[in-house]
Amino acid sequence: MPASGQMKDQLPYRSGPNKPVVGHLTHMNRHVPVTLLATYSDGLCDLEVTELFIQKWAKQQHRRFAFPGTLHSTGEPGSERFILRQVPQALLSAEA
């Protein structure tokens, strides 16, 4: 327990043989390649998820993703487009 003069929001840290070991992760962030389609004044945007990501995702059925916003598919099989609508702009990052 922290003394009354120490910060109360510090996480306890243990070292040595009693240090906890992570067995698996239930949540992780992953960068997904997208194309920015539209931005809105309320801080939201629409994105198109790349076809290559969707194809790889379909081959690995044990992986689940929780996307921000709402995922819509448009077009016919083989020429579908996957659009994420109402995604907060704060979640985007760009790479050159």
Image (cartoon, rainbow, N blue to C red):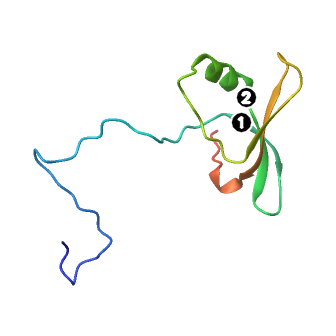
Tags 1 and 2 touching, CB below 8 Å: yes
Q: Amino acid at mark 1?
A: Val
Q: Tell me what residue is drawn at x 54 percent, y 27 percent.
A: 63
Give the answer, above or below, for where 70 lies relative to 10.
above
Residue furthest bottom as drawn: 5
Residue 34 or residue 58, whichever sits in front: 58
Whole-angstrom CA distance, mark 1 to mark 2, is: 6 Å
Looking at the picture, how far across and down is residue 50, in whole percent? 73, 28
Circle 2 SS class: loop
Residue 70 left/right relative to 4: right
Q: Tell me what residue is drawn at x 57 percent, y 32 percent.
A: 64
Q: For the C terminus, which image quadrant?
A: top right
Looking at the picture, how far across and down is residue 54, in whole percent? 69, 25
Residue 9 left/right relative to 62: left
Q: Which mark is residue 10?
A: none
Q: Which mark is residue 34?
A: 1
Quarter of the view holding residue 34: top right
Q: Tell me what residue is drawn at x 70 percent, y 54 percent.
A: 89
Q: Amino acid at mark 2?
A: Thr
Give the answer, above or below, for where 26 lies relative to 78.
below
Q: Which mark is residue 50?
A: 2
Residue 61 or residue 41, whichever sits in front: 61
Quarter of the view holding residue 14: bottom left
Residue furthest left as drawn: 17
